[in-house]
Image (cartoon, rainbow, N blue to C red):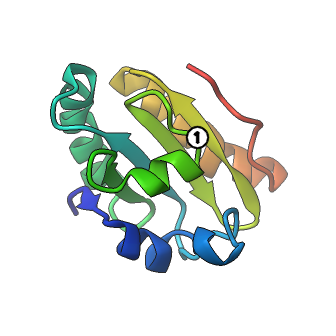
Amino acid sequence: MNTIHLTTEEFLERVADFENGHKWDYRGVRPAIVTFYADWCPYCRAIAPVLEQLARDYDGRLDVYKVNVDTDILVAVTYGANIIPSTLLFCSGHKPQIIRGKIDASEMERTIERAFFRHAVQSKRVPAEINA
């Protein structure tokens, strides 16, 4: 599976309907990460292959989305993605976590494992917000 680009409309359908007061009600079945990026951003370009690899490595267990802040600014503003890249980690029943700024591949994978897989199985909860 590859990273999936979402427009605002697709975000509203697949991730959360923030326009109708459901900002934190995740609509997905699997956990998901949503990365806010811009084509002109060098850090965003640097993490793009990392996101593609994560999409392949977690195929069927994790949805990997990206939102372009230049074309879909409303989503980014709604979720406080005021630094790019920023990545939201969504899991049903929990407020999303946010990672702000560039993060390397190994740290991203550790964060995903901790947030969605190891930690969720052990304690049935997702850790608090992460600020990188």
- Considering the numbered disc 1 on the image, is that residue within a helix, a strand or a loop? loop
**Residue drawn at x 58%, y 48% as measured from the top left:** 79
Q: Is residue 93 left or right of residue 17?
A: right
Which amino acid lies under the numbered mark 1 shown in the image of this protein?
Gly
> Of residues 55 and 129, which is closer to you in this image?
129
Q: Is residue 62 left or right of residue 127?
A: left
The image quadrant of residue 7 is bottom left
> Of residues 73 and 10, which is closer to you in this image?
73
Quadrant of image for the C terminus: top right
Residue 33, visible in the rendered structure: no
The image quadrant of residue 19 is bottom right
**Residue drawn at x 47%, y 47% as measured from the top left:** 76
Q: Residue 30 placed where, x, y %?
A: 52, 69
The residue labelled by disc 1 is 80
Quadrant of image for the N terminus: bottom left
Q: Residue 87 placed where, x, y %?
A: 47, 40
Residue 61, visible in the rendered structure: yes
The correct choice, above or below, for 112 with respect to 65 in the image is above
Q: Residue 12 placed where, x, y %?
A: 48, 74
Q: In this view, does 131 lie to the left or right of 61?
A: right
